[in-house]
Image (spheres, rainbow, N blue to C red):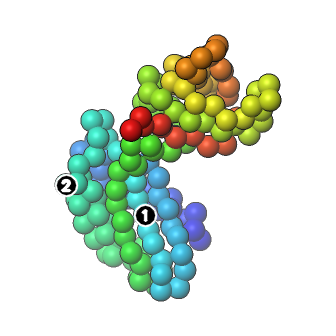
């Protein structure tokens, strides 16, 4: 059921955002009972504005109501950008983030290390190249990534 709702909402966000260049980054369906939360993260080239979030919230909320897509009707809808330290999960996330700093945790160690931080130097054919501040670049398959996110220098 959760996966069905996420897939349906993702499709709706794709339709709503297409004309504005907005795409869904992640859709979360959390909680239960009277405390359910539908959280949508959106992005577009050049970044997301508050107005983009308002428009997606209004349009997606209306479609969800009209199509009766959420059983039980009671939920909170949140729409936001993925933030400065956004998660990297899809190939497109890595492609768009080349040249930026990232933190990566791998499923299996390279040498004796699973945690890496550096600049995303390249992403090609499912292979990530990460250049740490010191040492040689590290290459690994996207399938090896347990979790990754951009790293913002405050």
- Residue extending farthest to the left is 51
- In terms of secondary structure, where does tag 2 sit? helix
Percent across and percent down for residue 118 are 54, 26
Callout 2 environment at 10 Å: few (<14), some (14 to 19), or many (20+)?
Answer: few
Residue furthest to the right: 112
Judging by the rendered image, the residue that carries numbered circle 2 is 51
Q: Quadrant of the C terminus?
A: top left
Mark 2 / mark 1, whichever is N-terminal: 1
Q: Does residue 75 appear in the picture of this structure? A: yes
- Residue nearest the observer in this picture, 56 or 71: 56
Structural distance between the alpha carbons of marks 2 and 1:
17 Å
The residue beneath circle 1 is: 39
Residue 79 drawn above or below residue 148: below
Residue drawn where x is 64% and y is 13% of the image: 136
Residue beneath the point at 44% across and 48% down: 25
Q: Along the horizontal axis of the image, is 141 left or right of 18? A: right
Residue name at image x 55 percent, y 65 percent = 4
Residue 51 on image: x %, y % = 19, 54
Q: Looking at the picture, how far across and down is residue 71, in whole percent?
A: 48, 80
């Amino acid at each position: 059921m959760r996966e069905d709702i996420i897939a349906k909402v993702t499709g709706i966000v794709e339709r709503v955002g297409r004309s504005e260049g907005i795409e869904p980054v992640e859709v979360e369906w959390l909680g239960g009972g009277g405390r359910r939360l539908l959280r949508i993260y959106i992005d577009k080239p050049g970044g997301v504005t508050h107005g983009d979030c308002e428009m997606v919230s209004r349009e997606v909320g209306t479609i969800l109501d009209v199509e009766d897509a959420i059983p039980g009707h009671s939920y909170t809808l949140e729409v936001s950008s993925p933030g400065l330290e956004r998660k990297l999960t899809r190939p497109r996330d890595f492609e768009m983030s080349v040249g930026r700093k990232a933190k990566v945790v791998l499923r299996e160690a390279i040498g004796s290390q699973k945690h890496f931080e550096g600049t995303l130097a390249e992403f090609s054919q499912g292979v990530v190249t990460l250049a740490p501040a010191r040492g040689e670049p590290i290459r690994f398959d996207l399938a090896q990534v347990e979790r990754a996110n951009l790293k913002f220098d405050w």
